[in-house]
Amino acid sequence: MAKATTIKEALARWEEKTSQKPSEAKEIKLYAQIPPIEKMDASLSTLANCEKLSLSTNCIEKIANLNGLKNLRILSLGRNNIKNLNGLEAVGDTLEELWISYNFIEKLKGIHVMKKLKILYMSNNLVKDWAEFVKLAELPCLEDLVFVGNPLEEKHSAEGNWIEEATKRVPKLKKLDERLQGHHRQREPQITQPAPGCLLRLKQSPSSPAAAPGRNPSYRWQCPC
């Protein structure tokens, strides 16, 4: 089996491709590395100016080493192997958008640290209890949530009361699963094709969360690349 790509190696590839210095860049894309990234290592601490970091479609298991990213506003971690939200406290004062769909998150412990989070895309995870979902109400700025594909959503959508029950518990939401709250008409979801590397990565790694048995690798919701 090929050795995992390190963050340092991925940054070197990105620098060669873009002719930008990672330490100065505001947006850095390290998604769909081949072989995939498995660890968020200390090399991330060099990205002091980064406002948007894309690490989606890899094999990352833990969120870590974000302490040096003092300007991070958007973090993309979709299609990894992440099981919890530990590690986000390092960017809790700046993060506005978290894209973390297609992972294995069941508990939302620690999510309250994201004081400025406005957008949370976490479809196709493993949240199954209202006791976890209500923790989202602790986010003072949250207004846009995508939660489709979690067992909790699937159960209550089948019963026909998902939107009602979810917005009752997190009443500040302006948009839930692309539906504008307060409007009777549902807005069509924005369909965005994944980046070519994202498709390639999924085809080459059937063990990735998006391709695991029972996990439909749908691109109905915006590709997090």
Image: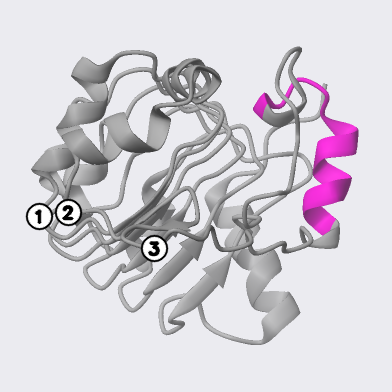
Q: Looking at the picture, which amino acid does disc 1 mark?
A: Pro
Residue 119 position, x and y percent, is 35, 58
Q: Earlier along the polypeptide chain: callout 3 or callout 1? A: 1
In the drawing, what numbered circle is on residue 172? 2
- Placement of the C terminus among the 4 image quadrants: bottom right
Name the amino acid, label 3: His
Residue 39: % across, % down: 50, 36
Question: Residue at left 33%, top 40%?
Answer: 64
Mark 2 Cα within 10 Å, few/some/many (few <14, many 20+)? some
Q: Nearer the viewer, residue 64 or 175?
A: 175
Q: Which of the labelled discs sits on residue 183, or is there none?
A: 3
Spatial separation of the CA atoms under disc 3 and disc 2: 15 Å
Q: Earlier in the sequence, mark 3 or mark 2?
A: 2
Region in magenta: 197-209
Name the residue tied to disc 1.
Answer: 140
Q: Are marks 2 and 1 in contact (CB under 8 Å)?
A: yes
As measured in the structure, the alpha-carbon distance from the residue carrying label 2 to the one carrying label 1 is 8 Å
